[in-house]
């Protein structure tokens, strides 16, 4: 069944308190709109990409949201600029860059690696 709501959240902060906050915001969206009716994507770029890295202090929160079906997307340009190997991203599978925004009818501002959690 197609979700009634589709939400994309952009994140570009390295601060741990802001990482905790954005994960809480994603949980709130799922609870407020209904997880069974909502598809959420968390898109990270710039310093915000740290939230998806293997040494992230919020790795458990990322894993929990992936398990709830939240789609995680990491900016490919940021990975290249920061010399980060995609293998360092947490619990994720890659998907074509255009998928991140095409689902919502947007043109992507830059190439992204989309990480899709299991529903």
Image (cartoon, grey):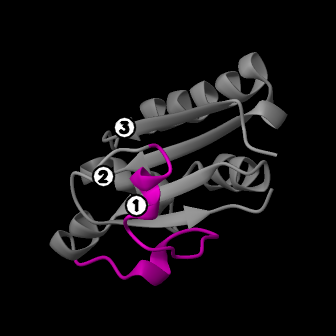
Using the image, determine if residue 58 lies above or below residue 85.
above
* Separation (CA) of disc 3 from disc 1: 17 Å
Name the spot of residue 113 as percent of width and height, x first: 41, 68
Asked if marks 3 and 1 touch (Cβ < 8 Å), the reply is no
Q: Residue at x 54, y 33 (%)?
A: 7
Q: Nearer the viewer, mark 3 or mark 1?
A: 1
Q: Which residue in the structure is indicated by mark 2?
A: 45
Image quadrant of residue 83? bottom left
Residue 44 shown left or right of residue 34 in the figure: left
Mark 1 is surrounded, within 10 Å at the Cα level, by few (under 14), some (14 to 19) or many (20 or more) other residues, namely many
Image quadrant of residue 26? top right
Q: Which residue in the structure is indicated by mark 1?
A: 74
Question: Was residue 98 drawn as part of the magenta stretch in this picture?
Answer: yes
* Separation (CA) of disc 1 from disc 2: 6 Å
Residue sitting nearer the eye, 109 or 84? 109
Mark 2 is surrounded, within 10 Å at the Cα level, by few (under 14), some (14 to 19) or many (20 or more) other residues, namely many
Q: Secondary structure at mark 2?
A: loop
Query: From which residue to which does the magenta span run?
Result: 83-104
* Separation (CA) of disc 2 from disc 3: 13 Å
Residue 34 shown left or right of residue 29 in the figure: right
Residue 91 shown left or right of residue 109 in the figure: right
Q: Which residue in the structure is indicated by mark 3?
A: 15
Q: Earlier in the sequence, mark 1 or mark 2?
A: 2
């Amino acid at each position: 069944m197609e979700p009634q709501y589709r939400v994309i959240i952009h994140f570009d902060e390295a601060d741990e308190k802001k990482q905790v906050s954005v994960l809480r915001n994603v949980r709130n969206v799922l609870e407020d709109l209904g997880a069974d009716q909502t598809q959420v994507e968390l898109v990270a770029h710039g310093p915000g990409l740290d939230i998806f890295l293997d040494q992230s202090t919020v790795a458990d929160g990322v894993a929990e949201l992936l398990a709830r079906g939240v789609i995680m997307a990491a900016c490919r340009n940021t990975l290249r600029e920061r010399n980060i190997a995609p293998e360092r991203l947490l619990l994720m599978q890659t998907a074509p860059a255009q998928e991140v925004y095409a689902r919502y009818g947007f043109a992507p501002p830059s190439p992204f690696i989309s990480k899709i959690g299991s529903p």
